[in-house]
Amino acid sequence: MRKKLQRFKDNAASNNVIEEGKPLYSTIKGQWGTDYFQNNHPITLELGCGYGEYTIQLAALCPAKNYIGIDLKGARLWKGSTLALEQQLQHVAFLRTRIEQLEQFFSPGEVQEIYIPFPDPRPKKSDINKRLTSPPFLDIYRRIMSPGGWLYFKTDDLDLFHYTLEVLQAQPDVQRLFHTHDCYQGSNILGEATNVQTKYEMMFINQGKTIKYIHCQLRSA
Protein backbone atom coordinates (compact mmCIF):
# COMPACT_ATOMS: atom_id res chain seq x y z
CA MET A 1 0.00 0.00 0.00
CA ARG A 2 2.85 2.38 0.86
CA LYS A 3 4.42 1.80 -2.56
CA LYS A 4 1.11 2.45 -4.30
CA LEU A 5 0.59 5.69 -2.40
CA GLN A 6 4.08 6.85 -3.35
CA ARG A 7 3.32 6.12 -6.99
CA PHE A 8 0.17 8.20 -6.77
CA LYS A 9 2.27 11.06 -5.38
CA ASP A 10 4.76 10.65 -8.21
CA ASN A 11 1.94 10.78 -10.75
CA ALA A 12 0.64 13.97 -9.19
CA ALA A 13 4.07 15.55 -9.65
CA SER A 14 4.71 14.20 -13.16
CA ASN A 15 3.99 16.47 -16.09
CA ASN A 16 3.38 13.51 -18.40
CA VAL A 17 0.44 12.15 -16.37
CA ILE A 18 -2.87 13.93 -16.98
CA GLU A 19 -5.33 13.12 -14.22
CA GLU A 20 -8.12 14.62 -12.19
CA GLY A 21 -6.95 17.53 -10.07
CA LYS A 22 -4.46 18.85 -12.61
CA PRO A 23 -5.27 21.97 -14.67
CA LEU A 24 -4.91 20.24 -18.06
CA TYR A 25 -7.41 17.55 -17.08
CA SER A 26 -10.33 19.89 -17.71
CA THR A 27 -8.83 21.99 -20.53
CA ILE A 28 -6.85 19.59 -22.71
CA LYS A 29 -9.70 18.62 -25.08
CA GLY A 30 -8.81 19.85 -28.54
CA GLN A 31 -5.55 21.30 -27.25
CA TRP A 32 -3.16 18.35 -27.04
CA GLY A 33 -0.93 19.70 -29.79
CA THR A 34 -0.68 23.22 -28.42
CA ASP A 35 -0.99 22.82 -24.64
CA TYR A 36 0.90 19.58 -24.06
CA PHE A 37 3.01 18.36 -27.00
CA GLN A 38 3.58 21.81 -28.53
CA ASN A 39 3.58 20.40 -32.05
CA ASN A 40 1.07 19.35 -34.70
CA HIS A 41 2.17 15.74 -35.05
CA PRO A 42 -0.45 12.98 -35.40
CA ILE A 43 -1.86 11.56 -32.17
CA THR A 44 -1.91 7.84 -31.39
CA LEU A 45 -3.79 6.35 -28.44
CA GLU A 46 -3.19 3.08 -26.62
CA LEU A 47 -6.39 2.05 -24.86
CA GLY A 48 -6.16 0.11 -21.61
CA CYS A 49 -2.42 0.72 -21.69
CA GLY A 50 -1.65 -0.80 -18.28
CA TYR A 51 2.05 -0.28 -17.66
CA GLY A 52 2.42 1.61 -20.94
CA GLU A 53 4.72 -0.90 -22.65
CA TYR A 54 3.10 -0.52 -26.05
CA THR A 55 3.00 3.26 -25.79
CA ILE A 56 6.67 3.47 -24.81
CA GLN A 57 7.86 1.09 -27.52
CA LEU A 58 5.81 2.79 -30.23
CA ALA A 59 7.10 6.19 -29.19
CA ALA A 60 10.71 4.99 -29.26
CA LEU A 61 10.17 3.74 -32.82
CA CYS A 62 8.51 6.88 -34.14
CA PRO A 63 9.37 10.34 -32.75
CA ALA A 64 7.23 11.99 -35.45
CA LYS A 65 3.98 11.04 -33.70
CA ASN A 66 2.53 11.86 -30.30
CA TYR A 67 1.51 8.93 -28.09
CA ILE A 68 -1.01 8.85 -25.26
CA GLY A 69 -1.52 5.79 -23.07
CA ILE A 70 -4.93 5.63 -21.43
CA ASP A 71 -5.86 3.63 -18.34
CA LEU A 72 -7.76 4.07 -15.09
CA LYS A 73 -5.16 2.42 -12.86
CA GLY A 74 -2.81 5.10 -11.59
CA ALA A 75 -0.26 2.70 -10.12
CA ARG A 76 0.13 1.08 -13.55
CA LEU A 77 0.43 4.41 -15.34
CA TRP A 78 3.27 5.27 -12.98
CA LYS A 79 5.46 2.66 -14.68
CA GLY A 80 4.89 4.06 -18.17
CA SER A 81 5.32 7.61 -16.93
CA THR A 82 8.60 6.73 -15.25
CA LEU A 83 9.96 4.96 -18.33
CA ALA A 84 9.00 7.87 -20.59
CA LEU A 85 10.81 10.30 -18.30
CA GLU A 86 13.88 8.07 -18.08
CA GLN A 87 14.02 7.73 -21.87
CA GLN A 88 13.28 11.43 -22.37
CA LEU A 89 10.29 10.67 -24.57
CA GLN A 90 8.69 14.09 -24.63
CA HIS A 91 6.12 12.99 -27.22
CA VAL A 92 4.47 10.63 -24.69
CA ALA A 93 1.68 11.32 -22.23
CA PHE A 94 -0.58 9.23 -20.02
CA LEU A 95 -4.23 10.00 -19.37
CA ARG A 96 -5.97 8.52 -16.36
CA THR A 97 -9.59 8.00 -17.27
CA ARG A 98 -12.14 5.44 -18.39
CA ILE A 99 -12.28 4.60 -22.08
CA GLU A 100 -15.97 5.50 -22.03
CA GLN A 101 -14.97 9.10 -21.29
CA LEU A 102 -12.63 9.68 -24.23
CA GLU A 103 -14.85 12.36 -25.71
CA GLN A 104 -14.28 14.49 -22.62
CA PHE A 105 -10.60 14.73 -23.57
CA PHE A 106 -10.46 14.62 -27.38
CA SER A 107 -12.24 16.76 -29.95
CA PRO A 108 -13.65 15.36 -33.21
CA GLY A 109 -10.81 14.51 -35.58
CA GLU A 110 -8.07 15.02 -32.98
CA VAL A 111 -6.86 11.39 -33.02
CA GLN A 112 -5.30 9.61 -36.00
CA GLU A 113 -4.60 6.10 -34.65
CA ILE A 114 -5.90 3.83 -31.90
CA TYR A 115 -4.17 0.70 -30.60
CA ILE A 116 -6.04 -1.89 -28.55
CA PRO A 117 -3.50 -4.55 -27.56
CA PHE A 118 -4.78 -7.50 -25.53
CA PRO A 119 -7.92 -6.02 -23.98
CA ASP A 120 -10.02 -7.86 -21.40
CA PRO A 121 -12.04 -10.34 -23.52
CA ARG A 122 -15.18 -9.92 -21.39
CA PRO A 123 -16.46 -13.41 -22.23
CA LYS A 124 -19.87 -13.11 -20.54
CA LYS A 125 -22.75 -12.25 -22.87
CA SER A 126 -23.91 -9.65 -20.36
CA ASP A 127 -20.56 -7.85 -20.84
CA ILE A 128 -20.62 -7.64 -24.66
CA ASN A 129 -21.03 -3.87 -24.69
CA LYS A 130 -18.06 -3.57 -22.33
CA ARG A 131 -15.73 -5.09 -24.91
CA LEU A 132 -13.47 -2.37 -26.29
CA THR A 133 -14.32 -3.43 -29.84
CA SER A 134 -18.10 -3.42 -29.38
CA PRO A 135 -20.20 -1.06 -31.54
CA PRO A 136 -20.74 1.49 -28.72
CA PHE A 137 -16.98 1.86 -28.27
CA LEU A 138 -16.35 1.97 -32.02
CA ASP A 139 -18.81 4.86 -32.22
CA ILE A 140 -16.80 6.73 -29.59
CA TYR A 141 -13.57 6.13 -31.52
CA ARG A 142 -15.15 7.38 -34.75
CA ARG A 143 -16.19 10.63 -33.13
CA ILE A 144 -12.65 11.51 -32.02
CA MET A 145 -10.76 10.14 -35.04
CA SER A 146 -9.88 11.98 -38.20
CA PRO A 147 -11.08 10.64 -41.57
CA GLY A 148 -8.92 7.71 -42.63
CA GLY A 149 -7.95 6.99 -39.01
CA TRP A 150 -6.50 3.57 -38.26
CA LEU A 151 -7.53 1.03 -35.63
CA TYR A 152 -5.07 -1.71 -34.56
CA PHE A 153 -6.07 -4.72 -32.46
CA LYS A 154 -4.20 -7.70 -31.01
CA THR A 155 -5.44 -10.56 -28.85
CA ASP A 156 -4.67 -14.12 -27.86
CA ASP A 157 -8.39 -14.78 -27.32
CA LEU A 158 -10.00 -16.53 -30.29
CA ASP A 159 -13.59 -15.69 -29.33
CA LEU A 160 -12.81 -11.99 -28.96
CA PHE A 161 -10.95 -12.05 -32.27
CA HIS A 162 -13.93 -13.56 -34.10
CA TYR A 163 -16.33 -11.18 -32.36
CA THR A 164 -14.23 -8.14 -33.29
CA LEU A 165 -13.84 -9.25 -36.88
CA GLU A 166 -17.60 -9.81 -37.28
CA VAL A 167 -18.36 -6.40 -35.78
CA LEU A 168 -15.90 -4.61 -38.05
CA GLN A 169 -17.07 -6.46 -41.16
CA ALA A 170 -20.61 -5.25 -40.42
CA GLN A 171 -19.55 -1.57 -40.28
CA PRO A 172 -20.28 0.20 -43.60
CA ASP A 173 -17.49 2.76 -43.25
CA VAL A 174 -14.68 0.34 -42.37
CA GLN A 175 -12.05 0.15 -45.10
CA ARG A 176 -8.79 -1.71 -45.81
CA LEU A 177 -9.64 -4.37 -43.25
CA PHE A 178 -6.84 -6.89 -42.69
CA HIS A 179 -6.88 -9.81 -40.26
CA THR A 180 -4.85 -12.88 -39.41
CA HIS A 181 -5.09 -15.69 -36.87
CA ASP A 182 -1.32 -15.63 -36.39
CA CYS A 183 0.60 -12.44 -37.09
CA TYR A 184 3.95 -14.21 -36.72
CA GLN A 185 3.38 -17.07 -39.14
CA GLY A 186 2.75 -16.58 -42.84
CA SER A 187 1.02 -13.20 -42.65
CA ASN A 188 3.96 -11.09 -43.88
CA ILE A 189 3.03 -8.28 -41.48
CA LEU A 190 5.71 -5.68 -40.95
CA GLY A 191 5.96 -2.78 -38.54
CA GLU A 192 4.40 -2.25 -35.15
CA ALA A 193 2.22 -5.38 -35.27
CA THR A 194 5.28 -7.58 -34.85
CA ASN A 195 8.03 -5.18 -33.74
CA VAL A 196 6.28 -4.24 -30.49
CA GLN A 197 5.50 -6.85 -27.84
CA THR A 198 4.34 -6.51 -24.25
CA LYS A 199 5.42 -8.92 -21.52
CA TYR A 200 1.95 -10.49 -21.66
CA GLU A 201 2.26 -11.07 -25.39
CA MET A 202 5.63 -12.75 -24.92
CA MET A 203 4.12 -14.86 -22.15
CA PHE A 204 1.26 -15.93 -24.44
CA ILE A 205 3.72 -16.82 -27.22
CA ASN A 206 5.83 -18.86 -24.79
CA GLN A 207 2.66 -20.71 -23.80
CA GLY A 208 2.17 -21.67 -27.44
CA LYS A 209 -0.74 -19.33 -28.09
CA THR A 210 -1.10 -17.64 -31.46
CA ILE A 211 -1.47 -13.87 -31.61
CA LYS A 212 -4.48 -12.69 -33.59
CA TYR A 213 -4.32 -9.33 -35.29
CA ILE A 214 -6.65 -6.90 -37.06
CA HIS A 215 -6.14 -3.47 -38.55
CA CYS A 216 -8.47 -1.26 -40.53
CA GLN A 217 -9.41 2.29 -41.34
CA LEU A 218 -12.27 2.95 -38.99
CA ARG A 219 -13.41 6.13 -40.72
CA SER A 220 -13.62 6.52 -44.47
CA ALA A 221 -10.98 8.89 -45.79
Image (cartoon, helix red, strand yellow):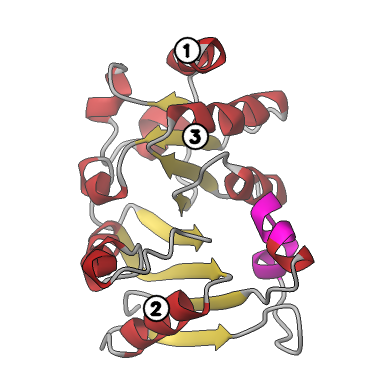
Q: Which residue is mark 3?
A: 93
Q: Which residues are magenta?
A: 191-203
From the top left corner, tell me how far across and down residue 28 is, in percent. 29, 32
What amino acid is labelled 2 in the image? Thr
Give whichever of discs 2 and 3 has the lower sequence position: 3
From the top left corner, tell me how far across and down residue 129 is, in percent. 23, 66
**Point 24% across, 72% down: residue:** 135
Q: Is residue 151 above or below residue 168?
A: above
**Point 42% across, 34% down: residue:** 73
Q: Is residue 204 magenta?
A: no
Q: Is residue 202 magenta?
A: yes
Pointer 1: residues within 10 angstroms few (<14), some, or many (20+)? few
Give whichever of discs 2 and 1 has the lower sequence position: 1
Pointer 2: residues within 10 angstroms few (<14), some, or many (20+)? some
From the top left corner, tell me how far across and down residue 143 is, in percent. 22, 61
**Point 25% across, 88% down: residue:** 172
